[in-house]
Structure formats: structure tokens, C-alpha cells
Amino acid sequence: MLNFFELKQKLPLANSDFGFLRKNGKCYVDKTEYIYQLALDNQPLILTRPRRFGKSTLLSTLEELFLHGVEPYDGHDSYFKGLAIEDKWHDQNQYLVLRLNFQNINRQCKTAAQFEQKLILRISDFCQKQQFVLPEKLLDFSMYLEALLEQLSYGSLVLLVDEYDAPLVRHLNDEAELKAYQELLEALFGLVKDYTEKFRCVFFTGITRFQDLGLGTAGNSFTDISLQSSFGACCGYTREEIRETFAEHLRYAAAVRLGCRAEEITESQIDALLDEMAEWYDGFCFDQHDRSKVFSTWSVLRFFSDADATLTPYWATEEGLGLPQLLKKTMERMDLSKLLNDISKGNIQTEHLRFLQSAVTNPEANPYALLYQAGYLTLNRAFLSNGVMHLAPPNREISIALANLVATRLFRKNFLYTADYALRTVDVLASLDPQRIQAHFNELFAAFPYQNYPVRSESMVAAVIHSFLMGAGLMTCCEQSESRGRSDALIDLKQHKLTIVFEYKYEQSASSEALDTKLNEALKQVKDRDYAHNAHSEPKLARFALVFCGEKSQRRLARVELADIITRPSPDSSSGRVSV
């Protein structure tokens, strides 16, 4: 069994190049079945996924295949030896491969003109290396690329473009630069269409569909495979892939978490760890028929690279990953009160047609489409024939990130949304003290921007508290369905072996009589419907009634009372209920 540092060295964290990974014995999840499908297709293809999902490795693998095939070369075995594609690929032809990473090129540029000059330099270098002679006095990128294409034989060039949308997304707030970049991309798409016969393969990746970038019909020659079932798991890791490729890493992590030796870990304990990892990092669905789900590539790798095997957010904490530039503009115009309600229910419905027609450059774009592309939302059921799409945060990590995104936007000017407050939340809840809980959440409501997001219903009270609890990293379910109805919130505090139920009521009046009436109504409802009695997973269940007063001078939780505490009965006890 390898030690931690040896295991960490095998993780593909610092380099995404396929050849590098295979040459240096890094862990490689075999995606060559998808590579084979991509390579067989002569149509220009485009694939969108959130950042850090393995798109660059996918392109690098295609590059290696078209440059060297699956036979040994340069005195070493093929890097495809032992992979799914090895016995399937029989194309003996050699191809020219032009690979461009627009994000890397764009990092060095402040304007579209500088970006174009960098592209021209790449084309010139490529032509020089391949001994193509370009005419003099070429004026722009499209002329350089066209001059190259004119000299090529049919089906000889493979064009791979990674992060093709990066320049446009970066300049969303600069109309002139955005237009210049759009014209560059339109020219590129146009040349791919006009010279289709010269290409053996054209494959673009990014986070944003070309339809969303205001490019008109320029990309109509491309086939968007982003939601096709056959490519649903081409990026990201499936549970089976993690089990097969990272077997030693799983065993080490399970041993650390259970405090035993790796040799003592059983298969069932590994399955239990995968269940926990799935709760945090699985659930991404890029399959319109909802047949496949994948784990976040980056989160899994970062989890395995942590010596303490800590299940915590990784992907959304990476600078530039959790909040892509396109979302910064979107958040300024979103109806956050609606978003709060939607995410608290964990199931967002949006029109399929409007989702597909949402352009990033359009001020009226469907914000949920953008949250989907950025990785904050994913499909949570197959497309429906009635034109409705169902979206949801895929897992606990992203639920926390999305709740944090909303909460920091809401409280940015008048509330220190700090780790200290979040940590105190757990202690306050675990105390089961109604007065402490009331005072704690009233700090939250005191900072809430009512002028923009009025709290006028039970659902809005639930949404504000729920989004905060999720942002604080607590496992929270809103409107948990049960046989006798729905509890408003169910919160698991695993470290305290405690489940808490909240039943909310809203009362506009500040009169004591009206507030007491609502409180008694909530207490009766909790007990009559026996919320979570059979559903809670922890040994102890505590159920609370909370009443929010909407009167302008109040706007706070006016009543909080513990309804009862229930403990799971031991075999020799007849009841575990403690009424309060």
C-alpha cells in the first residue's frame, strides 16, 4: 500500500495533458470510448461543461490519437495501450493537428486586437513548422487561416479549440470589445463551414454554447453534443470510474476517516465512503434523458489530495471557478427573492425553449441557463414533453456555494456573513434553546434588505433561513414530504447526532394574541402530523415552531418554541418521546 505522498503524486492535479499523464504513471480515468465516438464523427462538434471538468484532457487525448494513433512510436508503447480504444482504432493515417486554447491566449491580451495578433502568430508558427508558405500582406486572422486551408488536402486537418468562449465571457461588460471578439469567432465559424472538406475533425469546448454568445447563425454548421445521452459522462467521473481508477486512494481515505489501517478497510466501508462523496460531489447531469450522473472531477481530486480526507467544498472555492465572469453580471439583475424560494425547494422549473434561447449577451437571458452553464444547477430529471426543464443544485458542495452566492449578494453591505457566524449557528441549534435560536436568526433578519426583497410569506421566511443554513454548510431539506404533509425544514446536525424540524408561520400583525394563535397553530401542526418522526436519521429529533412577524416595526421572529424532543427508543423502552 502506497503512503499518502506517493498516492498524491499519482493524482492528475498539475497537468491535464494526456501524454504527460500516461508517461508519468498518473491516474487516468479511461474516457477513450468517448474519444472513439468523437473521432469517428466528421461533423464539427461543440461540447460545453463547467470549468475543471476534464475538457482539456479530453482535447489532449484527441490530439494524441490523431497525431500518433494507437501504435508504439519514438521507442515507447502507445499511450493508449490497455485503454478501451486500443483495439477499436484502425485509422493508420497521420493528420495535422492545430490545437488552440483561447483562455490561455486571452490571459496575455487586453483587447480583441491583441488576441487576434496572438492567433495570427499561432497560425504562422504552425505553417512554418509544417513548411507551408503563406502569402504576404495578409491583413487579419481569417485571411491567415484561409490561406492555410487553401493549401491543405481534403480531410487532413484536425482543429481543436479549448475554452473557445473565454474571450467573450471576459469582455461581457465592454460592448466594443465584445463585438470585436464576436466578429473574430464568427469568422472562425464561417471558415470551418466554408472549408468543411479540409477538416478530419473539428472539436470546440467551452462553458457557454455558441447560441448563447450572440453569434447569430455563424455556428450552425456545428453539432452541439452537450446534452446528448451518449456523451453524458464524457467529462467528470462516474462512481464506477472512481472505484476502478482510485482504488488505493479510496482505501487510504476510508482508513483515515475511520481511524484504522488501510489493510483493514472492507469493500462495504469503501462503498460507504463513496456514498458520502456522492452526497458532496456527485449529481451533475449533462444527459437530456437523465441516464447518467457524474462527480465533479476537481472536487474528487482535491479530496484525495487532502491528507485528512476532509469532505468540504473544493470546486466552488477555486478563484475564477465558482463564480465565472458571466455570473457577476447576471447576479446584478436576478430576482433573488424568487431564486431564494426556488433553491430552498431544491427543484427549479424553467421553460425549455427559453433556456435554449438564452444568450449571455442578452440582458433578458434566462439566469437559470447561466447558472446551469456555470455549474451551480444541473438537470435533475429528463426533459419533459410539455417544454418544462427541471433543474437543481447537484450536491451539497454546490448547494453551499449557491446559497453563499445569494447570501453574500444579499448581505454584502450591512451584514458580516462570516465563518464565525456560521459556526455559531451550529452551537445555537444544538443548544435547543428557543431564546438563543430566536436571537440568532433575528440577527440575520435585522440585516436583510427588505426594501428589495420583502418578506411577506411563510415561504420567504423559509427561503431566507434555508439559504443561510445551506451556506453555513448544514444539511437542510426544505418542504420535506411525508405521509401526513410537508415539514418546512429538516436540519441534520450529524456531529451532535441531532435532527431538527422547523415549522414556520407568518403573521402580519404584531399583536400578542395573533402571534400566540399562530404559534399554537404551528405547535399543533408539528405534533398532529408527527413531522419527521419516522424520517429522521439521527438518534435525537427536536421539533420547533417559529412565527415571523411581518409588521414594519418588527420584521423578526416574534415567537420560537420547542414542541418536543424525540429519541429513538432502545429495544427495552416503549417510548422515546419527551413533550415540552
Image (cartoon, rainbow, N blue to C red):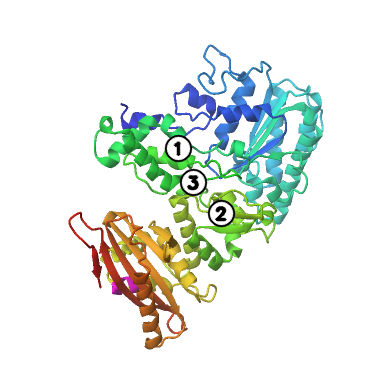
Q: Is residue 417 visible?
A: no
Residue 229 is drawn in which quadrant?
Answer: top right
Compared with 214, 232 (above or below) is: above
Disc on the earlier residue, 3 or 2 = 3
Q: Earlier in the sequence, mark 1 or mark 2?
A: 1
Q: Amino acid at mark 3?
A: Gly
Which residue occupies the foreground of this view, 137 or 479? 479
State if disc 2 and disc 1 touch (CB < 8 Å).
Answer: no
Q: Residue at x 59, y 63 (%)?
A: 332
At label 1, which amino acid type do we have? Arg
> What percent of the width, then of the height, locates residue 545?
36, 73
Q: Position of residue 308 (x, y in %)?
A: 31, 41
Q: Is residue 205 above or below residue 459?
A: above
Q: Which residues are magenta?
A: 434-438
Q: Which residue is mark 3?
A: 283
Residue under the point 42% across and 82% down: 554
Residue plotted at (66% across, 58% down): 365
Q: Which residue is mark 2?
A: 391
Asked if the stretch drawn in magenta spans residue 103, the answer is no
